Amino acid sequence: MKKNVLFGIVILVIGIIIAIVSLVIGFTNLFGESIKFTTPNVIESELEEGSYTVYYEYESSVEGRVYSTSEEDINGLMLRVIGADNTEIMVGPSKGSSNYTINSRKGYSVLSFDITRSGNYHIITEHDKDIVLNINKIELFTFVKYLFLSIIIFIITVIIALVSFTRKSKAIDETYDY
């Protein structure tokens, strides 16, 4: 096999691996730090400006206790978010429909809210059963940056590989008659 073809294949494989790693990093950074707790509860948390999604984890564990509830046990949930200045943040239905299974945790999105000013907030939940909620800040901008980075890495890798595949070898092919 010619050196330039082998070089192109190596560059292509390395580029694909780097692009996939970049995409995985972007995906894992899609969700910021999470706040996981059981209901009913009142917690105080420092929230940064951004969009938050509330997930109902019907299979989860909190502080060593395992929770396995019905996927429909969300009926009757009340969640309020109140700022330090006693302003109530509008909480509405989830902006999208998403669910997940991570190790032994399973959940789906139920509510969302937007924080326009970073600060301390009280999150008040009421429910007639002990259920687990997980609040995540969505870092969509970070994900998009990593997505574009992975696309650019992949395109550059393909271009370098194609150039090396089509480049003629510098060695001169001469046939000798003996």
Image (tube, grey):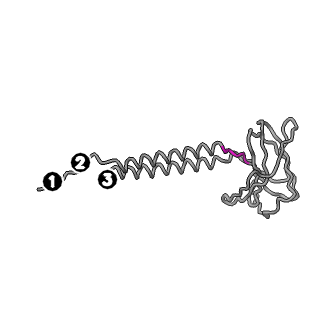
Look at label 1 and name its amino acid.
Tyr
Would you name the residue on which mark 3 appears?
2
Would you name the residue on which mark 2 appears?
172
Quadrant where the C terminus sits is bottom left
Could you say where residue 170 lies in the image, as x and y percent from the top left?
28, 45
- Measure the C-alpha gap from mark 2 to mark 3: 13 Å
Could you tell me which residue is drawn at 32 percent across and 50 percent down? 3
- The answer to whether residue 145 is left or right of residue 132 is left
Furthest residue to the bottom? 70
Look at label 3 and name its amino acid.
Lys
Could you say where residue 157 lies in the image, as x and y percent from the top left?
46, 47
Instruction: Name the quadrant containing residue 87.
Output: top right
Labels 3, 1: front one: 1
First in residue order: circle 2 vs circle 3: 3
First in residue order: circle 3 vs circle 1: 3
Q: Which mark is residue 147?
A: none
Could you say where residue 82 lies in the image, as x and y percent from the top left?
85, 41
Q: Which residues are magenta?
A: 136-140
Could you tell me which residue is drawn at 74 percent across and 61 percent down? 59
Look at label 2 and name its amino acid.
Ile
